Image (tube, rainbow, N blue to C red):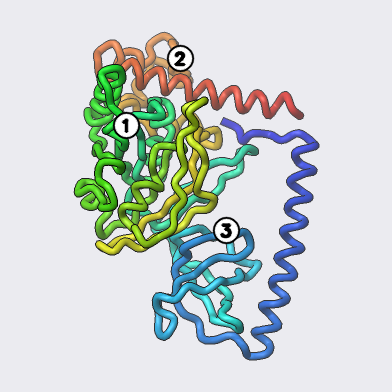
Amino acid sequence: MAKRRLNKQQQFRIKKVQEERAARAARKEKVVQEQADAGELGQEQEGLIIAHYGQQLDVEGLEGEHTGKVIRCFVRANIDSLVTGDKVIWRPGRNESGVIVARCERQNLLQRPDNFGALKPVAANIDHIILVLAAEPEPHDNLIDRYLVASEITDIPAVILLNKTDLITDRNRNHIDALLARYEALGYEVIRTSAAESGDRPAPEVEALVKNQTSVFVGQSGVGKSSIIQTLIPDEAIRVGAVSESTGKGVHTTTTARLFHLPIGGDLIDSPGIREFGLWHMTPQEIEYGFREIRDEMGHCKFRNCRHMGDPGCAIDAAAEAGRISPERRRSFHRILLDMAEQQARGLKLD
């Protein structure tokens, strides 16, 4: 799948943004260089990015007298994009500030595309992705599958956490049970909890999930990610949003990805709510790989250029008829492929 093309107006806007960023970077680099020339920068040491605020980042010191301290740092212009969870090399400066001079090697990186198809990093060095669902707003399998495809492609294990089990009723119970059973059958770990019922203390099943791990919470707004984090870190001031009664959709409450240390051990990264996780930056082959049960059928179609959309001799259709692929997962797979094709066509028409 070709990368989404931009029209001239979009290209102009992006160019202006890039020019402004370059100008800010140049001004920032000048300040950094002035401190370095004046001998005002301390020795290089390791740190951990715990929050990102535009051109500045909060870095927690991991060595010496700065261990455990949070320092607002600038970034040298020649360093690639940094993200919460990155380990970096930094030098302390004046006025409780610092300068990041290098990024350490990453274990992995979770990314998502922006509205123009460019990849935007979300978090780095993650042990597992915790995909939070809730009885309300109603969980949808296609959104779940998008997150799971991203998990499979980045090779970051995913755990499905159903929150707000106290809101399960006779009306939605069968739907939720069938939905979760489908993913359990594929080997995904599924955990049920209720932040509301656990009160001020974390639920035991959530505590066991995050202990001594670096976890990132993802999922649409309103499912209770911040509420769960608040039970894990009661001393932190985390805004908790309500679900809109008129639309049933969540209200965004988190504005930047942030890393929290857990008293029980481990780290937790809370990312901004994502209602729809686009995958149009991926190829059809990557989407195929992102579906565990479809991955096993690849290379067995009658024709090498099979589109897997009802083509003769399609191995996916044969696997679905044999019961190895559920109708819901095959439908979700088709929808993702169609969405990718529509995004590409829209980009071409805008030119």
Location of the N terminus (image quadrant): top right
Position of 204 compared to 214: left or right? Answer: left
Residue 189 visible, this angle? no
The single residue placed furthest to the bottom in the displayed view is: 39
Q: Is residue 157 above or below residue 350?
A: below
Residue 138, percent across and down?
39, 26
Which of the image's four quarters has the C terminus? Answer: top right
Which of pointers 2 and 1 lies earlier in the amino acid sequence? 1
Q: Which of disc 3 and disc 1 is earlier in sequence? A: 3
- At mark 2, the secondary structure is loop
Q: Can the viewer see residue 21 in this picture?
A: yes
* Neighbour tally class for label 2: few under 14, some 14-19, many 20 plus, Cα within 10 Å: some
- At 39% from the left edge and 31% from the top edge, which residue is drawn? 144
Amino acid type, callout 1:
Arg
Number of the front mark, 2 or 3: 3
Left or right of 264, for residue 280:
right
The spot of residue 22 in percent (x, y) is 73, 61
7 w.r.t. 334: above or below: below
Position of residue 268 relative to residue 131, above or below, is: below
Q: Which residue is mark 2?
A: 309
Residue positioned 55% across, 27% down in the render = 340
Q: CA distance from mark 1 to mark 3?
A: 31 Å
Which disc is residue 260 wearing?
none
What mark, if any, has residue 81 been given in the picture? Answer: 3
Asked if the residue under mark 3 is in contact with the one under mark 2, i.e. CB atoms within 8 Å, the reply is no
Residue 292: image tag: 1
* Point 56% across, 41% down: residue: 113
Which residue shows up at 25% across the image and 45% down it? 198
Q: Residues within 10 Å of mark 1 (few under 14, many from 20)?
A: some
User: From mark 2 to mark 1, how far is it between C-alphas?
Assistant: 18 Å
- At label 2, the amino acid type is Met
Left/right placement of residue 162 relative to residue 225 reads left
